[in-house]
Image: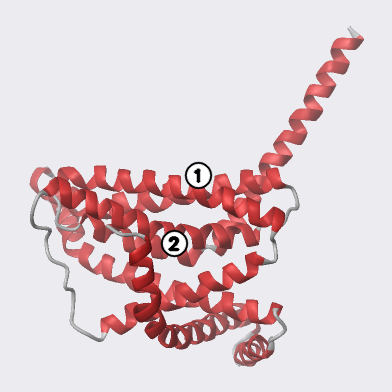
Amino acid sequence: MSGLLALLDDVAAIAKVAAASVDDVIGQATQAGAKAAGAVIDDAAVSPKYVHGFSAERELPIVGRIALGSIRNKLLILLPVGLLLSAFAPWLIPLLLMLGGGYLCFEGAEKIAHAFHAGDTHTAPVGDPAHLEEEKVRGAIKTDFILSAEIMTIALAAIDTPSLWMQAATLVVVAVGITAIVYGAVALIVKADDVGLAMVAGGRLRATRAVGRGIVAGMPGVLVLLTWVGTAAMLWVGGSIIVHGLDELGFGWLGHHIHDWAAMIGHQVPASGVDAVEWSAKAAMDGVFGLALGLGLIPLGTKVITPIWQRMMPG
């Protein structure tokens, strides 16, 4: 009997350790996912355009195929590469993080630059639908690879544990969780107008039909808002990554000035709002820096990096 009690005690102790490990993984994943917010929002904002112009019945299958490609990118390529870097070349992670931050700044600045040129130039796909779908899915998965690389690098840098297994488990949670959130949101976005139309056509109550009409009328504005929120998040996160990276490399004057300016602005409001105002001011200044850097990177990105990428990843 005493042996059985001892065994039960051991099982209970193992269960407590396992539960604590799960809590640690979830906590680390939540923190890492929050750090990658800018890239996550951009991923959700970019993806709906890949189903533009296809029939309604193909929208969800296309989103599903892109989501499957995204999870493969994260788990089969980026996670092993990230763990190898963490184990054998951790000094590369901050540099890759800054590279990802620079890409976020470039993407955000390019979106703003395009906004001042001609409006939406998207046209409905023409030609063989199956071939066009394959092209769209391949293009979406390529774009996702870049965004997923940013997400996984940012997440890896935010993980505060030396255990390789904990890092792997945390990255798996981040990869699966973020993919589910992003492409779940994309599925809701691309089908929202169909839901609205169904409510208008089949709603028995006037209120139901009114809500449906509101959804249909409001979705274009929601997509525009999501695009601008994603752009702002990219510039903010990208700028803050670069500022923090410069500080780690010994060039902290910009970060110190931004901190001091934000504190000075925060002291102009009542004490209850100081933290929020300081955070907002710092985020805004990080974003302005990110925009300036991104505008400077546009010639390099469009004239050098994009042609090289297209040659490396044809099709």
Mark 2 or 1 closer to N-term?
1
Secondary structure at badge 1 equals: helix
At 16% from the left edge and 49% from the top edge, which residue is drawn? 131
Residue extending farthest to the right is 2
Q: Quadrant of the C terminus?
A: bottom left
Give the quadrant of residue 264.
Answer: bottom right
Where residue 262 sits in the image (x, y, percent)?
61, 88
| Amino acid type, callout 2 | Leu
At 56% from the left edge and 45% from the top edge, which residue is drawn? 173
Q: Which mark is residue 147?
A: 2
Residue extending farthest to the front is 311
Residue beneath disc 1:
76
Question: Viewed as shown, does residue 299 lie left or right of 155?
Answer: left
Q: Quadrant of the N terminus?
A: top right
Question: Viewed as shown, does residue 228 lie left or right of 95?
Answer: left
Where residue 39 sits in the image (x, y, percent)?
46, 64
At 13% from the left edge and 51% from the top edge, which residue is drawn? 197
